[in-house]
Amino acid sequence: MILKNLDIVNLESDPLKESQEQEILEMIEEAKWAIVLYNDEVNSFDWVITCLIRYCGHTRLQAEQCAWIVHNNGKYSVKLGKYEDLEPVCTTLCEKGLSAQIELVSA
């Protein structure tokens, strides 16, 4: 079998591609993330408020306001920050029975 018009692939690294990848990684690291808490029919207001105070560092007033917003709107961003800072908090909230996930905040 004879191969014709075979494109030779350059196996050397592409500096432009590497710089673009680095820019993307830096954007992800600098991006703002949010723990989004979702409404459910399982957890009481008191439990949600307690968790927000303990694990998100909210004041009682902040926690109460967040709980009401979640109840009325179905979801709310209860904490903003870097992904690596939010991940253990979100995991703990979920372990405590709350419905939460980390989402990228749109600009």
Image (cartoon, rainbow, N blue to C red):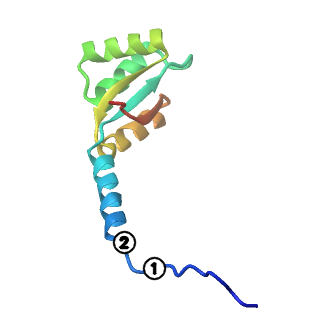
Amino acid type for the residue under numbered disc 2: Asp
Q: Nearer the viewer, residue 5 or 82?
A: 5
Q: Position of residue 52 (x, y in %)?
A: 34, 25
For residue 77, which quarter of the picture? top left
Q: List the single residue furthest toward the bottom.
A: 1
The N terminus: image quadrant? bottom right
| Left or right: 37 as drawn, with respect to 57 | right
Using the image, determine if residue 88 lies above or below residue 37.
below
Query: Residue 51, percent across and down?
Result: 37, 26
Image location (x, y in percent) of residue 73: 46, 12
Q: Give coordinates of residue 23: x percent, y percent.
A: 29, 54
Q: Quadrant of the C terminus?
A: top left
Instruction: Give the SS element for disc 1.
Output: loop
* Residue 47 placement: quadrant: top left
The alpha-carbon separation of the residues under discs 2 and 1 comes to: 9 Å
In this figure, which residue is indicated by the disc labeled 2?
A: 14
Q: Nearer the viewer, residue 3 or 65?
A: 3
Any mark on residue 10, and which?
A: 1
**Dot 1: within a 10 Å radius of its alpha carbon, few (fewer than 14), some, or many (20 or more) residues?**
few
Task: Kindly identify the residue that appears in the image at 43 percent across and 16 percent down.
Answer: 70
Q: What residue type is labelled 1?
A: Asn
State the residue at coordinates (38%, 32%).
35
Kindly check if marks 2 and 1 are in contact, taking CB atoms under 8 A apart as contact. Answer: yes
Total numbered labels:
2
Residue at 41% in and 28% down: 36
